[in-house]
Image (cartoon, grey):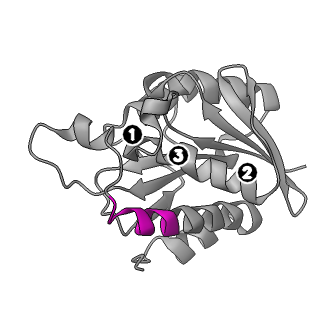
Amino acid sequence: MNKYLIVGLGNIGDEYAQTRHNIGYDIVESLVQKHGGQFRADRLADVAEIKIKGKQLLVIKPTTYMNLSGKAVKYWRDKEKIPNENILVLVDDLALPLDRLRIRGSGSDGGHNGLKSIQESLETVDYPKLRFGIGSNYPKGRQADFVLGKWKGDEWPLVLLKITKSVELIEQFVMAGLSTAMNQFNNVLFKL
């Protein structure tokens, strides 16, 4: 049976809810809700199990804080014996504008602490990542405040649209594979 590990990166705690850095959590919550699943507290993560047309998805929100995300990813990958190419990590990306999503099968951490931790734990950069563009509209030296800040009111409708599209992208990745998902979503400019 094909099994997938879908990882939404974020930080635990109400103060981080609906911040740019927690978009991974928001996407997986939407995915699990759409497919009738429910998260439960488990080792190093909140975990949900869902099926999409017979394919089994283990969906996790690491509860280790962002910069230790790799511990949770490695634990669940090893426990469930999921190959790296069937892992999909959902992450915010400053280098992409707000109207973009990008999925790739490999690639560096791009300075993202969550990805850096995963790369160290898995000892590879070769696992799929879905990067959710958050833009880089912040004053010099204020990157941390921007990333940990809440979405602006006028951004929210586009963010909600992109969360829906991210769920469709995950379904496409699971059903049709990485290259189909890349072809379908990587060059789209998302607009309201």
Residue type at tag 3: Gly
> Residue 40, how many percent across, how many down?
77, 31
> Residue 49, how many percent across, how many down?
82, 42
Mark number, residue 24: 3
> 146 and 119: which one is in front?
146
Q: CA distance from mark 3 to mark 1?
A: 15 Å
Mark number, residue 32: 2
Q: CA distance from mark 2 to mark 1?
A: 26 Å
Q: Residue at image x 8%, y 43%?
A: 140
| Residue tagged 1 | 109
> Residue 103, how many percent across, how many down?
50, 60
Residue type at tag 1: Asp
Q: What stretch of residues is rendered in magenta?
A: 153-162
Q: In this image, 7 relative to 23: left or right?
A: right
> Mark 2 and 3 residues: CB-CB less than 8 Å, in contact?
no
> 127 and 148: which one is in front?
148
Give the quadrant of residue 153. bottom left
Residue type at tag 2: Val
- The correct choice, above or below, for 127 with respect to 72 in the image is below
Q: Main secondary structure of the magenta part?
A: helix
Q: Residue at image x 21%, y 40%?
A: 143
Q: Callout 1 environment at 10 Å: few (<14), some (14 to 19), or many (20+)?
A: some
Q: Secondary structure at mark 1?
A: loop
Give the quadrant of residue 42. top right
Q: Tell me if residue 36 is in the magenta stretch.
A: no
> How many labels sit on residues?
3
> Mark 2 and 1 residues: CB-CB less than 8 Å, in contact?
no
Q: CA distance from mark 2 to mark 3?
A: 12 Å
Can residue 47 be seen by looking at this rendering? yes
